[in-house]
Amino acid sequence: MKSVRKAACAALFLSAVACQRSDAQVADPRPANDTSQKPAFAGQTDAPERKLNVNFQVVTVADNINTGWAFAFLPNGKMLVTERGGQLLVVGADGSKSPPVTGLPPVDARGQGGLLDVALDPDFATNSTIYWSFSEPQPEGANNTAVARGRFVDGPAPRVEDVQVIYHQVPAMASRAHFGSRLVFGRDKTLFVTQGDRSFEPGRMQSQDRNSLVGKFVRINRDGSIPADNPFVGQTGVRPEIWTIGHRNAQAAALHPTTGELWTIEHGTRGGDELNIPRKGKDYGWPTIAYGIEYRGGPILGGITAKEGMEQPIYYWDPVIGPSGMAFYTADLFPAWKGSLFVGGHATYDLVRLSLNGDRVVGEERLLKDIEPRPHVRDVRQGPDGALYVLTDSTSGKLLKLVPRR
Ligand SMILES: [Ca+2]
């Protein structure tokens, strides 16, 4: 059985005190893809399994959602749900579904592309504005991550008006993968957009190129303009949209409820999913440093996991969970879950719960292992009712909610 041994005793790097062995079990007993790699600090991977044994039941809110990608709660109790093929739906709390919202620009719905995240304006109550990310079609089979906004008009035939595409990742590339594209508003109402490396060699190698938006997280104003306090504003040869550098593909992002900082989780290859707190102007290392190995086997570039000037993830998974969607739980409905971070396990068909102590992961639990069909989790959010909502990825996907078992 796999214990915390590989995390706790990277003995070359840690003091004897920090390296106390624990016999606690980890949540995922599979061996790492590269057992020679060592974490940079104790607890960076394989946190001990921590079962809270919360008694919940899983309720189906809506079904027959075709390849759902994201959802957002409207103040009227309904939800906006994206289907990757290009449809935005209004789903009632009773599971009723509207006709597709009209007025959205076309999407390139090939591979991992299509209609992706959706978010409400911080001032939605007064401006009714919504934002969505998508893969934007370009000539000759190219595409790019893009963000649009529009004024949402609900009703029997819901629509968006005054639509503007406020952001285009450049350069566009001919790939069907790694669009990233979670949307998170900061407390200052700027918008973070996570992006990926397009999943092929030319894009991967641009992740360290500061004149490209591939493999970067960006921060923009609500009208698409550049915040004056972005880290590289005014620097020659550096895109001013950039917030952080060196990301592979993040499809999970949320604002920390206490610190107000952006937290993200990005996909690794075989090993190397990583939880980061992307801070202004920092380099998160892809592809120069990474945990895990190539899909085909063998090291990623030089196979190194640490380098001066590049940030370490605060936690990583090897083997991967396929992180998609994340939510900090802050509500009162499940007191034991308060302060936990929930992450969709798209590859492990489960819901991952992390116990946190500040910016350290101190425990891990896997939920929804026992429901059928196994949930291919794409997104997770806390609802206004305090329930935890989960969207599953299938041509007949479901929007589920976890509520206390009565
Ligand atoms: Ca990294």
Image: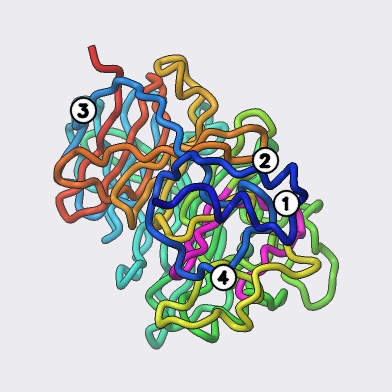
Q: Cα distance, mark 2 to mark 3?
A: 32 Å
Residue bearing mark 3 = 59
Name the foreground residue: 307 vs 104: 307
Which of the two labelled residues, at mark 4 and mark 1, occupies the earlier sequence position? 4
Q: Main SS of the magenta segment?
A: loop
224 to 106, vertically: above or below: above
Q: Which residues are magenta?
A: 264-287
Disc 4 residue type?
Ser
**Circles 2 and 1: CB distance less than 8 Å?**
yes
Q: Is residue 152 visible to the viewer in this orientation of the structure?
A: yes
34 to 200, vertically: above or below: above
Which of the two labelled residues, at mark 3 and mark 4, occupies the earlier sequence position? 4
Q: Cα distance, mark 4 to mark 1?
A: 29 Å
Disc 3 residue type?
Val
Disc 2 residue type?
Glu
State left or right for residue 303 relative to residue 2: right
Q: Cα distance, mark 2 to mark 1?
A: 8 Å
Q: Which mark is residue 36?
A: 4
Q: Residue at x 46, y 55 (%)?
A: 251
Residue bearing mark 1 = 279
Q: Position of residue 326 (x, y in %)?
A: 46, 43
